[in-house]
Image (cartoon, helix red, strand yellow):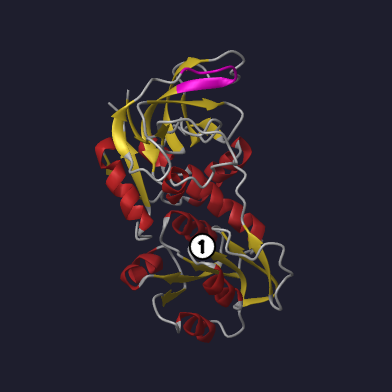
């Protein structure tokens, strides 16, 4: 079958022919119709999980996807041949990814039936970014009328977080690149601060002199993350989705500093689907691409300039 894979860590992703995976006990095989592109995909290719989880090569990339069950392994549980499902497919050994015509996935991890009203492209855009955003909002605990600052509010995670927070009645301060200021406003952000200058945090402080209840930073390394964390009121929380919070550090003078560690599950995915549907949040599919364009999309993702979600369309 055709897939996008790397032959070794840090090798360039390429379209190649690989063996079709067979479902083991507790797994199903899925004919992939769409796969979501995430920064985590190229990080896996670079070896971010090397030494922590087993891998197999060629390492087929992609953790998010949607498709139709084609076969089931022993004790596969609730899914049957012909069922539509979506979710995060990451499992051991790493390398049986969703950038492929067929992928296998254990039924006990973060997958769920695809909602009837969603296309496979929409469903593939949701899992990792959407679950991360919802987990962040639940961890932040900001209720209606509260204020949440989001640094990187127009990427995959940031778009979901902004839209879900606004739909819940939370006031959002969005910090984004200058070229996407209007996009952040379109998502419902009440205040927007352009990034790219040393004064960005001070501009945000001028807009919110009393601070914010919480911060979600999806893009900054430690030094910048700590500067943004200074916006958070005492007792609030500053969350980093890229592990920029100092490990085992005591809480700062104003905020608790937390690295958001996503634990995908079917329960979290179900809660996300409920929130998206009840709040009528638009799934942020920015563009769809063919499998052959995936290596270029990953290279673009490395620059940090992808907007919304890019989805690989694999349906026939």
Q: Position of residue 79 (x, y in %)?
A: 54, 20
Residue in the picture at 48% in, 45% down: 47
Residue 276 seen in render: no
Residue in the picture at 54% in, 54% down: 133
Residue situated in front as seen by the camera: 200 or 10:
10
Task: Decide if residue 276 is on the left or right side of residue 282.
Answer: right
Residue situated in front as seen by the camera: 117 or 74:
74
Residue situated in front as seen by the camera: 206 or 147:
206
Q: Quadrant of the C terminus?
A: top left
Please say whether residue 26 is one of the residues in the magenta stretch.
yes
Please say whether residue 229 is one of the residues in the magenta stretch.
no
Q: Position of residue 159 (x, y in %)?
A: 44, 58
Residue in the picture at 59% in, 73% down: 226
Residue 280 seen in render: yes
Magenta segment boundaries in residue numbering: 22-29
Residue 45 occupies quadrant: top left
> How many numbered marks appear?
1
Circle 1: element type? helix
Residue in the picture at 51% in, 86% down: 206
Name the residue beneath numbered marker 1.
Answer: 166
Above or below residue 103? Residue 283 is below
Q: Quadrant of the N terminus?
A: top left
């Amino acid at each position: 079958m055709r897939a996008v894979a790397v032959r070794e860590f840090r090798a360039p992703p390429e379209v190649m022919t690989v063996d079709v995976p067979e479902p083991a006990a507790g797994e199903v095989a899925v004919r992939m119709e769409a796969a979501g592109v995430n920064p985590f995909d190229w990080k896996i290719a670079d070896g971010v999980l090397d030494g922590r989880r087993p891998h197999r090569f060629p390492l087929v990339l992609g953790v998010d996807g949607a498709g139709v069950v084609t076969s089931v392994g022993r004790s596969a549980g609730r899914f049957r041949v012909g069922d539509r499902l979506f979710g995060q497919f990451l499992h051991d050994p790493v390398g049986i990814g969703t950038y492929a015509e067929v992928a296998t996935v254990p039924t006990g991890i973060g997958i769920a039936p695809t909602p009837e009203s969603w296309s496979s492209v929409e469903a593939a855009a949701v899992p990792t970014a959407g679950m991360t955003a919802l987990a962040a909002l639940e961890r932040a605990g900001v209720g209606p009328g509260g204020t949440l600052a989001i640094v990187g509010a127009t990427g995959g995670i940031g778009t979901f977080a902004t839209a879900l927070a606004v739909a819940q009645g939370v006031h959002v301060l969005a910090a984004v690149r200058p070229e996407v200021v209007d996009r952040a406003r379109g998502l419902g952000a009440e205040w927007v601060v352009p990034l790219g200058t040393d004064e960005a945090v001070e501009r945000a402080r001028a807009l919110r002199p009393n601070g914010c209840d919480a911060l979600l930073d999806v893009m900054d390394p430690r030094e910048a993350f700590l500067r943004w964390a200074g916006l958070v009121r005492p007792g609030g929380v500053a969350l980093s989705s890229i592990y920029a919070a100092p490990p085992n550090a005591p809480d700062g003078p104003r905020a608790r500093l937390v690295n958001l560690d996503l634990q995908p599950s079917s329960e979290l995915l179900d809660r996300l689907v409920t929130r998206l549907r009840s709040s009528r949040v638009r799934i942020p599919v920015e563009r769809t691409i063919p499998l052959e364009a995936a290596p270029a999309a990953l290279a673009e993702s490395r620059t940090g300039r992808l907007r919304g979600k890019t989805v690989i369309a694999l349906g026939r």
